[in-house]
Image (spheres, grey):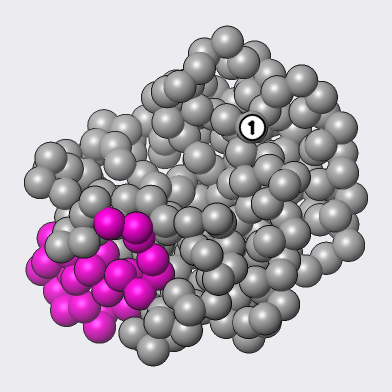
Amino acid sequence: MIDTHTHLYLNEFSDGGDETVVRAIASGVGHLILPNVDASTMEPMKALHSRFPENTSMALGLHPTEVGEGWEAIVDDMEKELMNGGYVAVGEVGVDLYWDKSRRDDQLKAFARQLRIASRLHLPVIIHCREALADTVQVISEVKPEAPLVFHSFTGSKEDVKLIREACSPMFGINGVVTFKNAASLREAIPEIGLQHVLLETDSPYLAPVPNRGKRNESSFLCCVRDKVAEVLGISPDEVEHATDCSAREIFKI
């Protein structure tokens, strides 16, 4: 299996993520994509990747909740870093108005800027969208990025899927939320999405799936996501694993 979105380098993992990577590999998760969050998380991410170069890949971008004063210079530096190579995607980037709407305009500008960077560098984009679907879709419609798009941690409805597809034809990252009791609308959306457009992820250390909900999430729990997607679609876990692994390898060139 491939965990297409995990932050095992964060401080929640006291050993820098090593033990959790080892557990993931033992559980059948053979590859993990590590997106950074901001400038301060670049080095921990790179350090973890250097210790597991065959089992991890990196993505780089400025998370929308980290867009503040001086964001332009940070994105400039990240663009230079991306141009040096070694990254499989731009991300995670996007729009998040859940906590704070005061930086909305800057978030939209930063998102558009990073979409254009991804297009120039021919890299896919890992999109973070929270309480901002209309704005996110609007930016995509305006920029028209020439890059594969992934709506990471998608938790929306069938109607949301249709709205997004008016602007683009992305992949949808499905994580532990799909196992939550209150996620009926997401489960109903998965047939609308279609297996060929699903990627599996954990978003560790967040959003641990049932039966581990409330605990620190880790990539070894990815099988719970795979199994729930299989249940929803009425197919075998092996079919889900094969299809999503093939999609991840094609998009991220891993």
Question: Depth check: 131 or 10 in front?
Answer: 10
Q: What residue do we see at 30% from left, 70% from top?
A: 221
Task: Tell me: 40 left or right of 96.
Answer: right
Q: What residue do we see at 75% from left, 45% from top?
A: 39
Q: Quadrant of the C terminus?
A: bottom right
Q: Secondary structure at mark 1?
A: helix
Q: Residue furthest bottom?
A: 26
Task: Tell me: 153 left or right of 140.
Answer: left
Q: Is residue 87 above or below residue 235?
A: above
Q: Is 225 one of the magenta-colored residues? A: yes
Residue 107 lies in quadrant: top right
Task: Tell me: 206 left or right of 32.
Answer: left
Q: Is 120 one of the magenta-colored residues? A: no
Q: Is residue 91 above or below residue 194?
A: above
On the image, the x and y values in percent for residue 122 come to 74, 56
Q: Residue furthest front?
A: 14
Residue 157 lies in quadrant: top left
Question: Depth check: 45 or 84 in front?
Answer: 45
On the image, the x and y values in percent for residue 208 come to 29, 57
What segment carries the magenta color?
215-243
Q: How many marks?
A: 1
- Residue 206 can be seen, yes or no: yes
Q: What residue do we see at 62% from left, 15% from top?
A: 103
**What is the three-letter code of the residue carrying label 1?**
Glu
On the image, the x and y values in percent for residue 243 come to 36, 75
Q: Quadrant of the N terminus?
A: bottom left
Q: Is residue 105 above or below residue 250?
A: above
